[in-house]
Amino acid sequence: MAHDKGGSRLQRPQRLADFINYRVYHLNRVALGAAALHLRARAGVTRREWRMISFLGEQPGTRLTELAESAGLDKVLASRAVHALVERGLVRRETRAQDRRAAAFTLTEEGEAVYRAAFARAREFNTQLAACLTAEEARILSRCLDKLQARAGAMLAEAQALPQPPGEAPAWALQQVWLADKG
């Protein structure tokens, strides 16, 4: 893909491939596909399992609803994923004394070991992916992504106030949109 030094393609797209969403989506799709293959081969986990394990590694005692929201999954998919990890002995389900209906999940000792191994592989992959950028480009990209995330969040909030066709669910439920500040 040809470089656009002035950024005009992003600010004034002339075709689909010029849109920020399109470019980020395709970068994400390719990078996630490669990362998934590395995680499966080197750490023995799927991408969805890695998301669950990583959130539990960073936030032990998380409830299913919080876990689903943080991972950007609906509750049914999150439930299936976390229960599969319980079956594998990587996650432990605990009930909270204050609310016995709301289970919290933590990593088992084996789950902690998988988390450390998978995190190391994911960090290695991220380092290799970012290696094509100079330090200054990485700083600029990070700032740009933060700005785009904030702007997209504001635009989503505005769009949620738009009238929806009668009888239809909104196109995006906020809890299904992964937010960078959650994870």
Image (cartoon, helix red, strand yellow):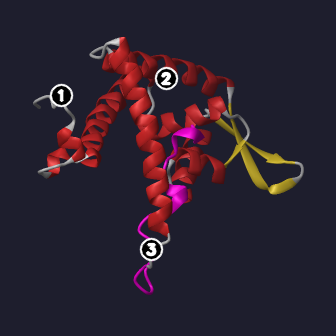
From the top left corner, tell me how far across and down residue 70 is, in percent.
57, 45
Q: Which residue reaches farthest right? A: 98
Alpha carbon separation for disc pair 2 and 1: 36 Å
Q: Main secondary structure of the magenta part?
A: loop
Nearer the observer, 72 or 14: 14
Q: Residues within 10 Å of mark 3 (few under 14, many from 20)?
A: few
Residue at the spot of label 3: 162
Mark 1 residue type = Lys
Residue at the spot of label 1: 5
Residue at the spot of label 2: 118
Alpha carbon separation for disc pair 3 and 1: 36 Å
Residues under numbered marks 2 and 1 in contact, where contact means CB atoms less than 8 Å apart: no
Residue 140's disc is: none
Which part of the image, by quadrant, shows the N terminus?
top left
Q: Which residues are magenta?
A: 164-183
N-terminal of the pair, mark 3 or mark 1, is 1
Q: Secondary structure at mark 1?
A: loop
Q: Nearer the viewer, mark 2 or mark 1?
A: 1
Nearer the observer, 2 or 35: 2
N-terminal of the pair, mark 2 or mark 1, is 1
Q: Residues within 10 Å of mark 2 (few under 14, many from 20)?
A: many
Mark 3 residue type = Leu
Q: Assess whether residue 112 is covered by the magenta stretch.
A: no
From the top left corner, tell me how far across and down residue 130 is, in percent.
34, 19
Residue 97 seen in the current view: yes
Alpha carbon separation for disc pair 2 and 3: 41 Å
Q: Assess whether residue 169 is covered by the magenta stretch.
A: yes
Position of residue 26 in the picture relative to residue 53 (left or right) = left
Mark 2 residue type = Ala
Nearer the observer, 121 or 23: 23
From the top left corner, tell me how far across and down residue 114 is, in percent.
55, 23
